[in-house]
Amino acid sequence: MQEQAKEIETLKNQVTSLSELNEFFDQIKATGENSATYYACMDIRCKAAAKIPIKVLQQGEHGTILRADHAVYRMLHDRPNQLYTAYDFKFATEFQRLEYGNAYWLPVYNLAGRLAQIQLLDSQKVTIQVNSALEPWQPGYLLYYYSGPSGMQILTPDEILHFRNYSKDGIHGRSVRRQIMDVIQAEESGQNLLKSKYESGLIDPLIVEADVDLSDKKRKQAVIKKFSGFRGAEHAGEIIPIPPDFKVQQLSTKLVDSQFFEMQGLTTKRISNGFGVPGFMLNDLDGATYSNIQQQNARFYSDTMQSTFTQYEGEMNVKLFTTSERRAGIFAQYNVDAMLRSDTKSRYDAYSIGISAGFIKISEVREKENLPFVEGTDQLLIGNGASVPLDQLGEQYTNGTPKGGEENGNQNQQDQDGVAG
């Protein structure tokens, strides 16, 4: 009974209740700037994950080829099911992974055992159950309970694709909003501090020293009422008459001393750091230059998104392909070349290097750029002063003298004779 109680308590901790969501959104609404920052970062991350296409490749003896005929490719590249395009499907998956800490795909197979579609489950309707009485490698140790329209469905780890965020135990994911909840609460406190400052006319507390006897309650209340009447923004700048038997001092509590403004900027940075989004994407150009913005953009994909892509690829390769397909070298991979699609110069420079180095064909480049095939481009070239076909490399040196050398020599001799004449 104690084990079951612990498991139930663990499940409750993993489920995001409606009250928690309402509390979170109440806090985030209290700070409009951070609300915009939060969803701007969410939008950047989701779009970055959605716009990169997924390829299905097969590695063999003669290199790696694209398997456009594979069912997984057609679904992840075009349409995983009747409800989503591939872009919307990947966008919604990344949103649920970041917002709720977990995202789930459910492959659906037809009667012939072939993959028919891939469904995106509602993360809030999936509960993870861990049977602590079993070892992790034993069947039934980890189960997924999905409360769908047709009732409760129990799934094993092999039947569902689970994408986690901030997972400490490798099983349960943790949402970004939980990570930055303390920052939002601190920001709300800062907003309340600023509000109270303005309501008091930005006047700090006063200390009143009186030479009269204030043991009388009525006299003490009269003194407090006299000076409290000058508080508020409507009394800012007014002159306060002070009787000769009173001495007034004002406490100095500067906003800079309380690090309020520093906290404002730090909160935004912590939210962006929680998402792994560089500041320039949020129009925070402090210390940014044209060159380092390009570097930051590249680092965003290499440091932030690459780890996300690796997680997706690992889950897809294990659970969307059969054992025989994996042994045949079939795997899924994000087409990271698409990251440079918006930067024409960088893209063309990379193509030029690949062509001149002899490992990319011009026809392959034209295919990437959606250009028609041109005869003579389906061959590897080597840049050696002038690009020549790879199969003709060295032919100009077949007789020990470059082709055209004899003609050039005769022409030079004629030029010298002409000058001498």
Image (cartoon, grey):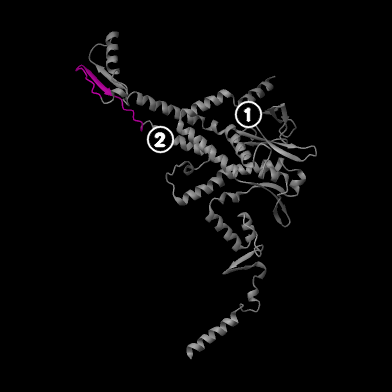
The residue sitting at 39% across, 26% down in the picture is 193
Tell me the element at label 1: helix
The picture quadrant where one finds residue 18 is top right
Label 2 environment density (alpha carbons within 10 Å; few <14, some 14–19, many ≥20): few
Query: Of the residues under marks 1 and 2, which one precedes in the sequence?
Result: 1
What label does residue 262 carry, if any? 2
Query: The residue under label 1 is which amino acid type?
Result: Gln
Q: Is 293 contained in the magenta span? A: no
Identify the amino acid type marked 2: Glu
Magenta stretch: dominant secondary structure: loop
Determine if residue 166 is in view. Answer: no
Q: Residue at x 62, y 49 (%)?
A: 335
Q: Position of residue 21 (x, y in %)?
A: 55, 26
Residue with the most extreme left position: 244
Q: Which mark is residue 124?
A: 1
Is residue 252 a member of the stretch shown in magenta?
Answer: yes
Q: Give the residues in magenta.
A: 238-256
Is label 2 in a helix, a strand or a loop? helix
Alpha-carbon distance for marks 1 and 2?
Answer: 36 Å
Residue 5 appears at what percent x and percent y? 66, 21
Q: Who's the residue at 33% across and 28% down the image?
A: 253
Residue 330: percent from the left, percent from the top?
Answer: 72, 48
| 206 up-or-down from 142: above or below | above
Q: In front here: 57 or 142? A: 57
Q: Does residue 391 appear in the picture of this structure? A: yes
